[in-house]
Image: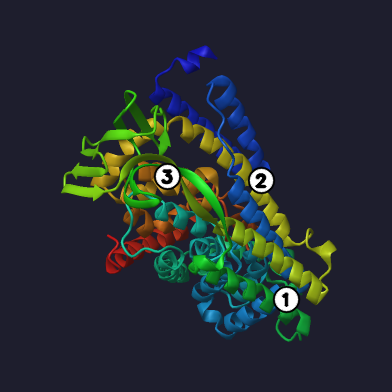
Amino acid sequence: MEFLQNLSEGYQFLIQLIIVLICLFYGARKGGVALGMLGGIGLIVLVFCFGMNVGKPAISVMLVILAVVVASATLQASGGLDVMLQIAEKVLRKNPKYISILAPFVSATLTVLCGTGHTVYTLLPIVYDIAIKNNIRPERPMAATTVSAQMGIIASPVSVAVVSLTAFLLGADTKLANFDGYLDLLKITIPSTYFGVLCIGIFSWFRGKDLDKDEEFQAKIKDPEQRAYIYGSDENATLLGKKLPGRYWAAMWIFLGTIAVVAVLGYNKELRPSWPTSKDAASIQIKAGDEILQKISVKDATISLTNAAKNSEITFANNKVKKETSGTEILTAQIKDKKGNVTTIVRDGDKVTLTDASGTKEFTNAKIVVNKTEKSSKTLDMVNTIQIFMLLAGALILIFTKAPANKIASNEIFRSGMVALVAVYGISWMAETMFGAHTPMMKEYLGGIVTEHPWTYAAMLLLVSKFVNSQAAALAAFVPLALTAGVSPALILAFAPACYGYYILPTYPSDLAGIQFDRSGTTHIGKFVINHSFIIPGLIGVISSCIVGYFLANLYGYL
């Protein structure tokens, strides 16, 4: 396949993009875990035919998904989820006319609380039952409910998407003033997400034909068997009138209590354990004994040193010393960074003089020292914190509520979560391999375009999300690239909801479940695949959320 490798980068990128899209479309048609496995075909072509360096699958994303799904599946097996659903059903059945607005809010809230959109599977039969028995077109609340469930991920304190984005923004070279992390992100994403959910609900209230005016539906229910199937009661579609045991309530409170603890730990870093460590931190120090009088941190610079033995030059790159000087008594140091700024340090006996753009400083009884490492402490990160506490929640529920462990792996949340995990595994690996190889080209074009047209960042993130089928994986793949290309962290914060774009094609398990649970057939995939029930609600929700996110980022002074 040498001829493929000899093509220009632009042609290679175009061909590879077509291959990725073919894998996505075919995977959507086959359904289930096929989407993830199709990533293997894409990887074979990219690695063996184009000779690309294989990327890394989104392991940390997958592990958090696994931990959250296991905890949520345990909650379902213990009956704790039934308590949440019973409360939600009371609200929905009390106001059936507003099911198209209320159901999306309920599903988004379940996601915010549980950290996964897979809780929607147990809600969908209830939503369908309420809609069809009140002659409301099921497509209206069903599509809105599945889309809103996924939108809640970027507003959940226990989602890996929130944790990952917080880490990227805090680690950016350009710091956001007054942005301290976790809760500062949520104060943007929670209100913007719920506004988007509201817009989806309002649109859904009026979408499509009423059932009595839908010729296709009316023709279908003329068949007595079809009518019985569509309007038939599902004994599992209601929890009303059932007295739930106390252990169900205990399971719910254990789960919610664990989430509250995770939120507190995310806000207060000092509450998490830390360990002493050392890291590369190149610097020139002016010291008196062991006391550091002045420290000049150097990330990327060239330093000319003079000592009693000879002249020497040290190159610093990414905080690492690339070449060391000989001798210990440094007499002069001249630091030139990549912007051309020069700092000069001269030692004369016990006196050290520092000269830079701001002026001259003198230090007595001092010496010049090159420092290669810096002692620091490493705090337990939130990705691992979420995994630990989600496993803890599942264990506590099992111990104190006597939940049947054998039912955890067989319930809907676990099965659908594993399907999503396989999809993230294959698709994100394939996409990371492709995008990773073309990072320099994308950086070259990305920075200028986004500077002139800020909305293009959101559009690009949306497309990446579709490719990798995961919000967290999309953020992990695209945000570092955007930051390196010079995209403002404030813009990344404002457009956080754009990380949900996998509604563009109906490949996600929750979308497919919405179609399956709608026995009326109004929630559907069109002839051309792209014309399905979820794309318009998805676009409305994400675009409106991004607009509000942009407004809030301005309001809080980030933009």
What residue do we see at 32% from left, 57% from top? 490
| Disc 1 versus disc 3: nearer the observer | 3
- Compared with 459, 263 (above or below) is below
What residue do we see at 74% from left, 65% from top? 225
- How far apart marks 1 and 2 lie (CA) works out to 28 Å
Measured as percent of width and height from the top left, residue 72 is found at 68, 65
> Of 279 and 272, which appears nearest the observer?
279
Q: Residue 422 carries which label?
A: 2
Of marks 1 and 3, which one's residue comes earlier in the chain?
1
Give the quadrant of the C terminus.
bottom left
Of marks 1 and 2, which one's residue comes earlier in the chain?
1
Q: Are marks 1 and 2 in contact (CB under 8 Å)?
A: no
Left or right, 132 with respect to 394, comes to left
Q: Mark 3 points at which residue?
A: 480
Q: Is mark 1 on a helix, strand or loop?
A: helix
Left or right, 355 with respect to 251, comes to left
Quadrant of the rendered structure where residue 398 is?
bottom right
Give amino acid for label 2. Answer: Val
Quadrant of the rendered structure where residue 220 is?
bottom right
Q: Is mark 3 on a helix, strand or loop?
A: helix
Give amino acid for label 3. Answer: Pro
Q: Mark 1 points at which residue?
A: 251
